[in-house]
Image (cartoon, rainbow, N blue to C red):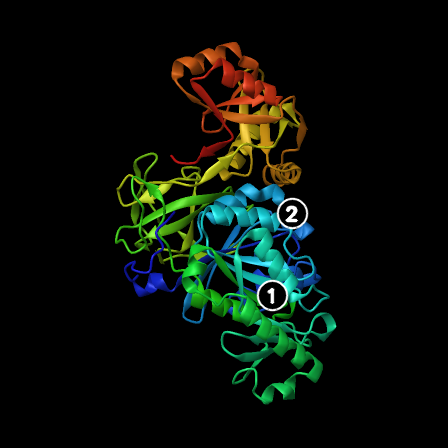
Amino acid sequence: MLDRTHNAPDLPPEIARRRTFAIISHPDAGKTTLTEKFLLYGGAIQMAGQVRAKGEARRTRSDFLAMEKDRGISVSASAMSFDYKDFRFNLVDTPGHSDFSEDTYRTLTAVDAAVMVIDGAKGVESQTQKLFEVCRLRDLPILTFCNKMDRESRDVFDIIDEIQENLAIDVTPASWPIGVGRDFLGCYDLIHDRLELMDRADRNKVAESIEINGLDDPKLAEHVPAHLLEKLLEEVEMARELLPPLDQQALRDGTLTPIWFGSAINSFGVKELMDGIGEYGPEPQVQPAEPRQVSPDEKAVTGFVFKVQANMDPKHRDRVAFVRMVSGHFKRGMKLTHVRSKKPMAISNPVLFLASDRELAEEAWAGDIIGIPNHGQLRIGDALTEGEAIRISGIPSFAPELLQTARAGDPMKAKHLEKALMQFAEEGAAKVFKPAIGSGFIVGVVGQLQFEVLASRIELEYGLPVRFEPSQFTSARWITGEKIALDKLEASNKQHIAHDHDGDPVFLTRLQWDIDRIERDYPDLSLTATKEMMV
């Protein structure tokens, strides 16, 4: 467990104003729409794109791959930096679809908090639960936004109970909805005693707020119909008695989540949520590493790569490494040591992102996310430091759940296919295994949709038609242990042995029986379903 105590030293003001967070949710809960509204309020864009809209309104900034634009889903994590009031927000939009959960998991290693988006009608859904478990493993503070309150949604106490029971976390309301569905008027802000009213006419307009002195202020009756006001007073009284108050330490420990209600598509409740992230969200935190933890207030610059995206600009074969700055004040042109190769790297054109738009970053502080264009030197898990050999821990690589054989449509282009697959392996988009016997590659992914994305990207970005065919193997395990035992295993099980893109040995299995047999016959070796991406 990381140390998140209050007696940590005060951070320099530039670092203390950073808020680095990810948005997590089940597909379709409104995550991308909420991201767009964040950018609108941060002044980063003039018009918010919507996933389901038509024409120019459909160009969402956070979905930049061709497939994301066509299908209206996020399949790749993207980073955005913008200012809001006194804060610098670094927002990472993660894929909601479970087939891309590994990308999401790695993204969560690079943030200090998560915003969980829940659909008011559907409550806690399966993917929300999975992503929440990941946050729990990292003790991430969580802020919750209950979206789509302008549609028919469930009773507020039901939603809160479901979060408390399914996710085993205390919930405290930061706002309370007035009416529901067609009768939804807005919310009562419980933290600042304000009435927030929704404007249904203009979706890009910030809701007006009316200062109220507590719930017995007669001004309330001027804006809220009597039957809704009576219900509001009754529910808020119950909520204040039954639910815990907002405790900042419990929020930081990940045991309590404040919940805001709203409608992202109508720009309602978003500003209050952003104020909440600024006010209660954590500052940049201490990063677990070997041989020691790294604190954000250290003078020396440290950062680590949590994602690599190839061909963000299809006209150039570029690869951008997303780097989370962990400590210090980075300036453009600095020479940093690439810990894995022990070589110095001059970082001359680092970029700041607004999804696929980017600008040169003259400087960055701990908490920021910058992109470093490179030609394959940087991989997921790599650390960049001012000379100290620090390895960042806690970035996992999971065994794939589906394995298929990749074949180039044109046999003359097999070499090109190898290059394309290696790029995707380094990006973390798929596992690529080279079997010890035979030609071709076995590609492993977490979900079926990833094969479609890979095939479409290989064709678009490399002009290579590719077929994925069923493989005889169903799963893969990394092998670790004594070299003598490893050589013996490889010699007698050649048809099961492959190597991943790092050259590490992998045992390909058809049945659980294969794994049990190896564990019985080779007690000195261990087969694991995860590999720590520590270099």
Name the one closer to the observer, 9 or 336. 9
Q: Secondary structure at mark 1?
A: loop
The residue that mark 1 highlights is 48
- Where residue 499 sits: x, y (%)? 50, 23
- Where residue 324 sits: x, y (%)? 40, 50
Q: Is residue 40 above or below residue 458?
A: below
Direction from residue 214 to residue 147 in the image, left or right = right
**How many other residues sit within 10 Å of disc 1, few (<14), some (14-19) or many (≥20)?**
many
Give the mark, 1 or 2, whose residue is nearer the N terminus. 1
The residue that mark 2 highlights is 67
How far apart are labels 1 and 2 at the CA level? Answer: 20 Å
* Quarter of the rendering containing residue 171: bottom right
Name the one closer to the observer, 13 or 406. 13
* Quarter of the rendering containing residue 184: bottom right
- Where residue 490 sits: x, y (%)? 49, 14
State whether residue 32 appears in this view: no
- Please identify the quadrant where the C terminus is shown: top left
What type is the residue that disc 1 sits on? Ala
Q: Secondary structure at mark 2?
A: helix
State whether residue 90 appears in this view: yes
Name the one closer to the observer, 378 or 398. 398
**How many other residues sit within 10 Å of disc 2, few (<14), some (14-19) or many (≥20)?**
some
Q: Is residue 112 above or below residue 449?
A: below
